[in-house]
Amino acid sequence: ENEIVELWNLVVHGQRLLRAATKAQGFNVGLNLGECAGAGVVDYLHIHIVPRWSGDTNFMPILAGTRMLSEGLRTLYDRLMEVQAKIDAGSQRST
């Protein structure tokens, strides 16, 4: 049960990072559980957190791998790390 709470806390944190980095207005969160569900490995789980915006229409093509994202993954990674650094700095000041 504690693992479920920890996992969900990470999902919420991921949404927080993505919202700050991309100005997302909402999210689709999905789980892949087990080999036949797309995880590729028995007893494995991974979670997708997909940022969404009003009026966007490209959610399914991105999941199917048929459409380019508007920004490179390295650029997004750098923005997420910048947001995380600000969160970490704020945590250090409050302790």
Image: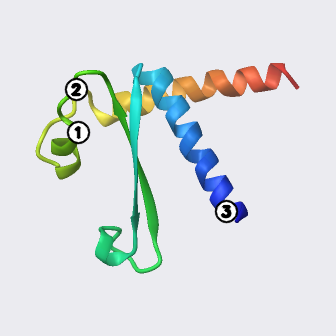
Query: Badge 3, how many Cα within 10 Å: few under 14, some, many 20+?
Result: few
Q: In which quarter of the image is the C terminus?
A: top right
Please state the horizontal and vertical placement of residue 12, each as a whole percent of the image.
57, 40
Q: Identity of the amino acid at label 3?
A: Glu
Residue under label 1, please give it: 59
Residue ID at (17%, 51%): 64
Q: Identity of the amino acid at label 1?
A: Phe
Q: Residue 56 carries which label?
A: 2
Q: Do the CB atoms of the residues marked 3 and 1 lie less than 8 Å apart?
A: no
Q: Residue 3 carries which label?
A: 3
Q: Quadrant of the N terminus?
A: bottom right
Q: Do the CB atoms of the residues marked 1 and 2 lie less than 8 Å apart?
A: yes
> What is the C-alpha distance between the residues marked 3 and 2?
33 Å
Q: In this view, does 61 lie to the left or right of 6?
A: left
Q: What element carries label 3?
A: helix
Say which quarter of the image contains residue 93: top right
Q: Is residue 95 left or right of residue 74?
A: right
Residue ID at (39%, 75%): 34
Q: Which mark is residue 19?
A: none
Query: Badge 2, how many Cα within 10 Å: few under 14, some, many 20+?
Result: few
Earlier-in-chain disc, 3 versus 2: 3
Say which quarter of the image contains residue 73: top left
Residue found farthest to the bottom:
42
Q: What element carries label 2?
A: loop
Q: In this view, does 75 lie above or below 93?
A: below
Q: Identity of the amino acid at label 2?
A: Asp
Q: What element carries label 1?
A: helix
